Amino acid sequence: MRLLYFYIIIGFLLILNPTLIQCQEWYSLTSINIDTRDYIEESAVPYDGGIIFISNRLQSALRKITDQNGNALNDIFYSRQKDNKKWSSPDEFAKIINSKADELSVSIDKKTKNIYFTRLEPEGNTAIYMSKYNGKEWESPTLLPFNLRNYNFFDPFVTDDGKRLFFASNRPGGQGGSDIWVSNLGRSGWGPPKNLGPTVNSDTSDVTPFMHSNGKLYFASSRKGTIGGLDIFWTIELNGIWLPVKHLLGPVNTKYNDYSYVSDSIDRNGFISSDRAHSPDIFSFNMKMPVFDNPKPIEKNTYKYRFSETSVISDSSTFIYEWDFGDSTKLRGRILDVVHKFPRPGDYMVVLNVVDSLTGEVNTNQAANVVQVRDEIQPVITCPDSVYIGDEVSFETTKSYLPEMKNPVFYWDFGDGDMSKGSNIKHIYAIAGKFRVVLGASGFTKENTFNDFVCVYKYIIVLDKKKTP
Amino acid sequence: MISDKSLFVFLLLFLLFTNRAFGQPVPAADENIPYLMTFGPKAETSWGDDDFSQTFFFMVPESYKGAVYIRVFDPDVGGAVDELNGTFDTQMTYSIFGGKGAYSNPDARETDPKGNYKSGNMLATKTFGVNPKYDQNWYTFGPFNPTDGEYDKQYGSYIFKVICDGISGDDGNMYRYYLSTSGTDNKSIEGANAFAFEYSFRMWDNPKEVSHIYPYVDDKTVTVKVSNFDWDNDGYIRVVSVAKNGLLIKASGDNNWVTDQFKISPEEKNTSLDFQFIKKQNPPVKNNNVVVNVRNQYNELLKFYTIPIGGVPKYKYVMKNEKIKD
């Protein structure tokens, strides 16, 4: 009977919040309280203690904004996060920006507060506008110069320094479908868009770019390899080369459309949009992967010990000391401070025998210690010191020695932006260089208290076969 | 704060518990000394005796109510054990003292037989010359009532003083004592002990034998000054304690006194020291006699207990280890 109740409760929870069970592994996802069942809430952007986002919700109970065909229009809204982590009832954001056309996505320059957004043009295409903030209010939006008639320009994202604008467009010169482009801010304004190339862009939809200050470019794509619809991918530009894109880890991606990734300064908390629960909604996420804090270089196992008899204050050299290290080696002499290197980990009974040189008497076992020789307590990365681009490299943890950790879980940061979890991992480096591989471990002690996350690092050299003699 | 008496009683109880205080042979087993030694007054001091007199004290715990006997082994001067110098013509007098002043009189607690060192009530005395009856045999003084000794409140014991004086002649008297509950046998008194302020004794001829004496260091002792006489450069004197694994001190040559001094560490307070007399292995010196006394920084003599207070001190080696980097 209890089991039946349990299943009923779980079923009820799933009906209330279908994402609850999915939120495992790398991220935890939560639907936020401004989401509605039937209206669109999407493309959240953190701003001023809250978020601005796109919605076609009612402006108020008495006011419904529709287009000529009676369809509810998308506008930009703002909601503040309250002390109890709940979100306030959304308000229309900057009336001068919201028009009688659809506003579809938005980005804000953190320094200038200038707003970039997408608007559905009367001709049916979308274009990117900018509304300048004059210190008091936003001014009338202006069309950015690189928009082209008959082509869609949308999903703008302006970088933290305000000097680069990523966006999506199906303009000519792309890889097919809509691609991610970037325009740089020059003296005379936004420069000509540059396609990010075939590594980033596919022949399907590549949309909603977000460039984090750590260099990672997140975007959504319906390319081959998705779970379904749009999925969120990321890549990073190293030495002028975009690395092969990676599917975002964890439960972020589903068979539905998942897009509009934005995150905080440490790239561990943020928002995505997804239509997994009927209409598009905003989900907040928290990365569950531990922080690789102050990793240390891997300590070499030496098994070297110093033994001393420090309390002797009156030795008049009438004794000869024999150190028996318990590993079939002995050391004799008038020395009470010795260094010995054991051959391998183990328990060694070290005995101090004292030979009286005046009487010839041998006093055995004058002091004895069991020395537990162990490896350094640390996770250990086992991998080649150097590899070639494209090699499948094994990263193993088998030499780790973590006696206080019960079933440790290992986390990897390969230094090229990619991370993973597990004891034995395969990884391929796409570019040459020197990468710092970080391995962290966490787990519970035998007393079931949580151990601190401990991490180590090791450098790996990735060589380019073509450039290696 | 632990009083001296409490500490002493505790240490005695410790000895009882460890079955170490059940005999009052003088010298005691742990000392590994063959004989006490006193020469006739005509002997050259180069034979090993500086003053031709030796004083020992026996402590009987106040809890013991029976009769006590003080027995002397080989009290005469003649025969196989004693040291012949020409012909045996030496006389020794053994005197037992008790009552007030026997122990407490300062003259009784000095190294030399001067002043009123025979203080207290003489309970018995006997003089021996050559006497085959007692050659390698026991003579018994007593019985004595324990209360015949001088009561010492600090130690909770009655103390008897035994003085062996060389009266005449120049031969060496080798002898032993035993504090017994029996007049005919050596039967121990639980908790009893014996001590001297100066120890005059015969060494073994066998160079492999190591003799020991155990001065007791009280809690006011900071430094000690060791004096030894006529060791004949026969080897080494080494001090072992709970804090010293083997401190060699100066040893005397022939017919001279040598003094050495060393510090007492805090952990040595209220423990005994082990003075080891280690003979040279080659060539062995025979019939070697030595006299030893120890004073603290106040010039007070330390007692040599035949059963070391706190047990035979053993230096405890402490091994430390630490992992080090390459």
Image: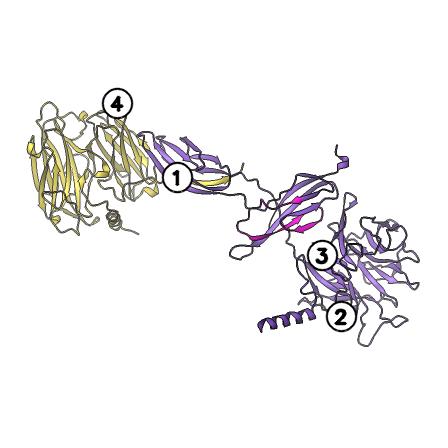
Chain colours: A purple, B yellow
Q: Which residues are magenta?
A: A394-422
* Residue beneath disc 3: A264
Q: Nearer the viewer, residue B298 or B221?
A: B221
Please report, as a chain letter, where disc 4 is located: B
Q: In the image, A354: left or right of A406?
A: left
Instruction: Of the two numbered discs 3 and 2 on the same chain, state the one appearing first in sequence.
Output: 2
Instruction: Of the two numbered discs 2 and 1 on the same chain, state the one appearing first in sequence.
Output: 2
> In the image, are marks 2 and 4 on the same chain?
no
Of helix, strand and loop, which one carries label 3? loop
> In the image, are marks 4 and 1 on the same chain?
no
Residue B116 visible in the displayed image: no
Residue B170 visible in the displayed image: yes
Q: Which mark is residue A417?
A: none
Please report, as a chain letter, where disc 1 is located: A
The quarter holding residue B134 reads top left
The total of numbered circles placed on residues is 4
Query: Residue type at mark 2?
Result: Thr
